């Protein structure tokens, strides 16, 4: 059967089964988000100078004074590491703003530094073609209005200020933390109002929180997604922060989830989120970071790797060296395709059961030494593949076989040992509607 016939068959079955096996579909913004699947988190603020993870909100602003701050250096490191963007902690729980906000007196304006870090970073990102995102904690341990309805106005005004002055904002990161403010009160966050404002100001911005609406927390900060990882999540009855789905559910998603909300893995290159000199020798190694890459991006999630600037305002040399090692390892698998020139034979789905028995079969003219396989699902039709058999053979004799569950944006299968192979077969055992495999590679 030729490729044109296969394509026509696939389109017919897709049309006939779409209603029966309907899945939530990603937005165009989410599809772009999947494509840009590795980027930096940067925790930076007074905690960088106090050694705290969560500031109290009463730190003297003068302590914030990064004497050598260079956002061009941050972006150079990010670009050379293969990261597609940077998300900066514009305001952490201590309430300190990395921009001179009109709605706070706890900002860079009152600090020993004075300069507008958001403006500098946004410009640096634009210069080298990196995406720019912001983390904005709704918790504020400094603002006198926190714990009152007036604070919702403050937070909305801050959002509007950031989007209008520093946009475009690629991703907005919401932490669901909710503790007491300086008056001892808890805030009732008006999430609906916040979200409506962002949608109005920037419809293409990805909004992250533990329950989305566009990207979800993976349920841990250790650097891995579930081996089964659906981009779907049920959110009815849940709320952000306390009251979110279980960590297990966040890690695996829901097979029949009503909403398309893919997982993002946030993890730090260091033991803590903010830079401490005492952790300079505890930076994760290239091998540890590569394991994280395989268990996050390699399981269909996006990777948000925290690389915190030090008190100078620079990314530390130890972090840079580890990132160089990671980039080398990523290139070894992402820039190689041993089946690039293989003959492809696609067998269409069973007419009586389009959810099963789709097969992709690749054949090489001569053996290749294979260490792993990378699969990508075509997510514009929704995530559908629930189970597949992957096998490698050498001149017809099987040398490796593994059954996996989800594929999603990317599934990286690392073999326990390298093998010589001439054939790769991918057989779909179960799918939610017609499975569409976009790409298969070997390294």
Image (cartoon, helix red, strand yellow):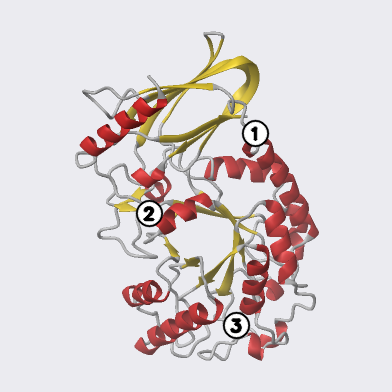
Percent of width and height locating residue 382: 34, 44
Q: Residue at x 59, y 69 (%)?
A: 88
For residue 408, side relative to residue 374 (left or right): left
Mark 1 or mark 3: whose residue is earlier in sequence: 3
Q: Residues within 10 Å of mark 3 (few under 14, many from 20)?
A: many
Q: Is residue 98 above or below residue 230?
A: below
Instruction: Give the percent coordinates (x, y) of residue 135.
Output: 53, 69
Residue shown at 71%/75% (left/top)? 49
- Assess disc 1: are there few (<14), some (14-19) or many (≥20) residues with their C-alpha within 10 Å of its C-alpha: few
Q: Secondary structure at mark 2?
A: loop
Distance from Cα at disc 2 to Cα at disc 3: 30 Å
Q: Which residue is mark 3?
A: 99
Residue at the disc numbered 2: 261
Q: Is residue 15 visible?
A: yes
CB of mark 2 within 8 Å of CB of mark 3?
no
Q: Answer with mark 2 or mark 3, whichever residue precedes in sequence.
A: 3
């Amino acid at each position: 059967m030729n490729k044109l016939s296969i394509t026509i068959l696939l389109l017919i079955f897709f049309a006939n089964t779409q209603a029966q096996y309907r899945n939530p579909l990603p937005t165009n913004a989410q599809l772009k988000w999947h494509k840009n699947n590795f980027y930096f988190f940067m925790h930076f603020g007074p905690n960088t100078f106090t050694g705290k993870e969560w500031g109290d909100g009463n730190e003297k602003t003068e302590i914030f004074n990064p004497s050598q701050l260079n956002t061009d250096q941050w972006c150079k490191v990010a670009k050379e590491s293969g990261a597609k963007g940077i998300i900066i902690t514009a305001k952490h729980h201590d309430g300190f703003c990395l921009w001179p906000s009109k709605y706070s007196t706890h900002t860079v304006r009152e600090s020993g530094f004075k300069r507008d870090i958001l403006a500098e970073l946004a410009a640096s990102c634009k210069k080298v073609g990196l995406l720019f995102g912001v983390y904005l904690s709704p918790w504020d341990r400094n603002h006198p209005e926190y714990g009152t309805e007036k604070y919702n106005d403050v937070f909305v005004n801050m959002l509007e200020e950031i989007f209008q002055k520093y946009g475009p904002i690629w991703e907005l990161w919401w932490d669901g933390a909710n503790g007491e403010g300086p008056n001892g009160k808890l805030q009732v966050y008006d999430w609906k109002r916040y979200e409506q404002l962002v949608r109005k100001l920037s419809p293409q911005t990805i909004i992250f929180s533990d329950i989305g609406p566009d990207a979800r927390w993976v349920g841990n900060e250790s650097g891995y997604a579930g081996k089964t990882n659906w981009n779907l999540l049920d959110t009815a009855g849940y709320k952000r922060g306390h009251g979110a789905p279980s960590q297990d559910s966040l890690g695996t998603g829901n097979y029949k989830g009503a909403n398309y909300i893919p997982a993002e893995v946030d993890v730090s290159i260091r033991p803590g989120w903010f830079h401490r000199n005492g952790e300079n020798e505890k930076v994760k190694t290239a091998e540890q970071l590569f394991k994280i890459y395989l268990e996050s991006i390699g399981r269909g999630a996006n990777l948000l790797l925290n690389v915190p600037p030090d008190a100078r305002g620079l990314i530390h040399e130890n972090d840079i060296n580890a990132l160089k090692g990671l980039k080398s390892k990523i290139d070894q698998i992402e820039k190689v395709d041993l089946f690039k020139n293989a003959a492809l034979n696609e067998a269409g789905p069973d007419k009586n059961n389009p959810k099963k028995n789709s097969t992709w079969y690749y054949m090489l003219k001569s053996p290749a030494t294979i260490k792993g396989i990378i699969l990508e699902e075509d997510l514009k039709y929704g995530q559908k593949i629930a189970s597949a058999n992957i096998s490698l053979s050498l001149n017809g004799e099987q040398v490796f076989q593994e059954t996996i569950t989800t594929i999603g944006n990317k599934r990286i299968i690392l073999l326990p040992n390298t093998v010589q192979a001439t054939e790769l077969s991918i057989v779909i055992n179960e799918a939610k509607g017609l499975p569409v495999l976009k790409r298969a590679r070997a390294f």
